Image: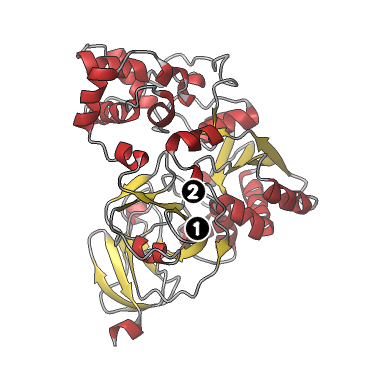
Amino acid sequence: MNSEYVNRITEAGVVGAGGAGFPTHVKLAAKAEYIIVNAAECEPLIRVDQELLLHYSNDILEGLTGIIQETGAKKGYIAIKAKHTEAIDCLKEQLKHYESIELFLLEDFYPAGDEQITVYEVLKRVVPKGGIPLNVGCIVCNVETVLNVNNAARGKMVTTTYVTITGDVKTPATFCLPIGMSYKEALELCGVETWDGKVGIDGGPMMGKVIADFEMPITKTTKAIILLDQDSALIQKKTKGIEQVLKQSRIACIQCQKCTDLCPRDLLGHNVKPHLVMRIANYGLSDFGGMKTALSCSECGACELYACPNGLSPRKVNAMIKQQLSEAGIKIDKEEEQKSPSDMIAYRKIPVKRLIERLGLKKYDVSAPLKSFECNVKKVVIPLKQHIGALARPVVEKGMMVSEGTLIGEIANGKLGACIHASISGIITAVANESITIETREDRI
């Protein structure tokens, strides 16, 4: 039986706001020794965590305190890069009133925000291969998730998401946007008027996905929209098909092993060997053990966008092998002996400044302050799956009037999932298999 606290988080539809969208109520139904707020924001150009800590530090600390109490944890840590001095100063002032919470200052490296890397940096504990932080006594939440937890405890549903809009835009900024708003409308807030030759990325430049259609909606997990020229090296790399990737690999892979040397998960001892996977892909070797190393790949992109001297894409090859193994029902062998972290783990961290240079994004590495705007969004298309798990089940019908915060999708049959709520007030104009459309009354008259 869940507590009233967890029930409120369930009802509010809180999910991991900065990752794959794991339902937060499931995480917080467990007991833990430590709670870590992941404020590393290791992906270049994203500014959400910094802005939230500056503007809502007390709400975030209250949210973390509630999580600590609910899970029985003895301490909470906010893991933040030491370079974010303004946010740190703000937190230090507030932390005088919170005895069970401490700051943990991180170096400026990629991927400091990888959940398992963060756990190792803060606690020097290694999450087992294929495991979760709870396996080593801790729960990790990102900054916006903790803010949403605090809001949920006060009865506020998740209807918005904080998004940094940057790249080739006139005025980079961070906004609190209604879920279901289109990428196009969001970009227009930053002065974008033409789309010719432009491509967007949802998320950071390393792990973010290319936006196929600017009319598509933002979701609970959208943390950044980065607009770039279609001819930029980063976009060219991200849009390269697997056949071209494999062809280039066969021609240019020199088996230097730099992809493995700099792999964050391999340095943790998870036995991820992208150079072996490349060898198998290049020469057709039947090294099943080498193929299985791909299963532990986090797809952080360090091998693809930083390590490889020939600009190859071990990540995409790993992802292809992972999919093939998954389809064959082959999973990570959790019984395999866990290796200790490499002695080189402290010396092979990827400097973010150098990474930004390598990605060709230096001119876009600018502030993106939190700004308010008059929300006159006339239409939202709200996906019923913005989280890990099953699609939410619609609880509304076409023609119904709803207000912001109204439940429109519930967790289906007790499955893993999250509730979905209306992000604007208006009329339900469509209930499709995977989304619900809401339009304002004024727009329908």
Q: Position of residue 307 (x, y in %)?
A: 43, 24
Q: Are marks 1 and 2 in contact (CB under 8 Å)?
A: yes
The answer to which image quadrant residue 324 occupies is top left
In the rendered view, would you say 416 is above or below 384?
A: above
In the rendered view, would you say 212 is above or below 240?
A: below
CA–CA distance in space, label 1 to label 2 = 9 Å
In the rendered view, would you say 343 is above or below 407?
A: above
Residue for point 46% across, 43% down: 361
Please report whichever mark, 1 or 2, sits nearer to the chain's N-terminal start: 1
Residue type at tag 1: Pro
In front: 30, or 309? 309
User: Would you say residue 151 is visible in this rendering?
Assistant: yes
Q: Secondary structure at mark 2?
A: helix
Image disc number at residue 346: none
Outermost residue to the bottom: 445
| Total numbered labels placed on residues in the image | 2
Q: Secondary structure at mark 1?
A: loop
The answer to which image quadrant residue 317 occupies is top left
The C terminus lies in quadrant: bottom left
Residue for point 40% across, 66% down: 188
Q: Position of residue 133 (x, y in %)?
A: 53, 34
In front: 19, or 326? 19
In the rendered view, would you say 211 is above or below 337?
A: below
Residue type at tag 2: Tyr
Q: Is residue 93 left or right of residue 143?
A: right
Q: Position of residue 274 (x, y in %)?
A: 36, 20
Q: Which residue is mark 2?
A: 364
Image disc number at residue 172: 1
